[in-house]
């Protein structure tokens, strides 16, 4: 699938995000081997310093909102000692498109840039996770000054998700 964005595509940003997301997808394999995953997120400041990195921990923490993005935002807010990350112009990189909950979490955190790997449609097709309803979120984020790039290093990400499913790991969700 082609790269998508809510701004005019900047090749430099895509190249940088491709490197970071490829590395995150690679690292995600060992995260999965250690019982977490299949999602991993990292936050960088505007000088490319790594500020926070975390995987999802829903199963381990017995907490339904412990998604990779939420865990990473929490780490960054502890690091800066504030609930408002907006002054720091931070970028969130995440191995798959944020779910409906994490879009809210990102909005309230003041994160300014998002780069994601596998789009939700493919995550749902491959794994059976429910990503929620997200009408026009790229446009809505643009209105709020949040830049989004997606489908970056997507192929590598899909392979990791396929591996997760093949290995029989838990696709956690509320029971019907
Ligand atoms: Zn989420």
Image (cartoon, rainbow, N blue to C red):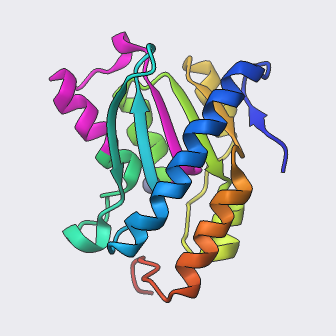
Q: Residue at x 58, y 44 (%)?
A: 21
Does any portion of residue 59 appear in the rendered image? yes
Q: Quadrant of ligand 1?
A: bottom left
Residue 40 part of the magenta segment: no
- Residue 102, given in percent of the width and then of the height, sits at 44, 47
Give the image quarter of residue 166. Answer: bottom right
In the image, residue 128 sits, relative to residue 93, either above or below, namely below
Quarter of the image for the C terminus: give it.
bottom left
Segment colored magenta? 72-99
- Residue 19, given in percent of the width and then of the height, sits at 61, 37
Q: Residue at x 56, y 60 (%)?
A: 132
Q: Residue at x 32, y 72 (%)?
A: 34
- Residue 175, given in percent of the width and then of the height, sits at 40, 85
In the image, residue 33 sits, relative to residue 43, either above or below, namely below
Give the image quarter of residue 5. Answer: top right
Number of marks drawn: 0
In the image, residue 107 sits, relative to residue 22, either above or below, namely above
């Amino acid at each position: 699938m082609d790269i998508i964005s809510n701004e005019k595509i900047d090749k430099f940003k895509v190249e940088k995000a491709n490197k970071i997301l490829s590395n995150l997808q690679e690292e995600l394999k060992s995260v999965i081997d250690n019982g977490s995953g299949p999602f991993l997120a990292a936050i960088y400041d505007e000088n490319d310093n790594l500020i926070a990195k975390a995987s999802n921990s829903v199963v381990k923490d017995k907490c339904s909102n412990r998604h990779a993005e939420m865990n990473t935002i929490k780490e960054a807010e502890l690091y800066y000692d504030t609930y408002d990350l907006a002054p720091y112009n931070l970028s969130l990189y995440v191995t798959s498109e944020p779910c409906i909950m994490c879009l809210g979490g990102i909005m309230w955190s003041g994160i300014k840039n998002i780069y994601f790997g596998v789009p939700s449609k493919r995550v749902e097709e491959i794994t059976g996770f429910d990503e929620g309803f997200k009408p026009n979120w790229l446009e809505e984020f643009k209105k709020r000054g949040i830049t989004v790039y997606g489908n970056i290093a997507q192929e590598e990400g899909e392979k990791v998700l396929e591996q997760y499913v093949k290995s029989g790991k838990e696709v956690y969700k509320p029971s019907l």
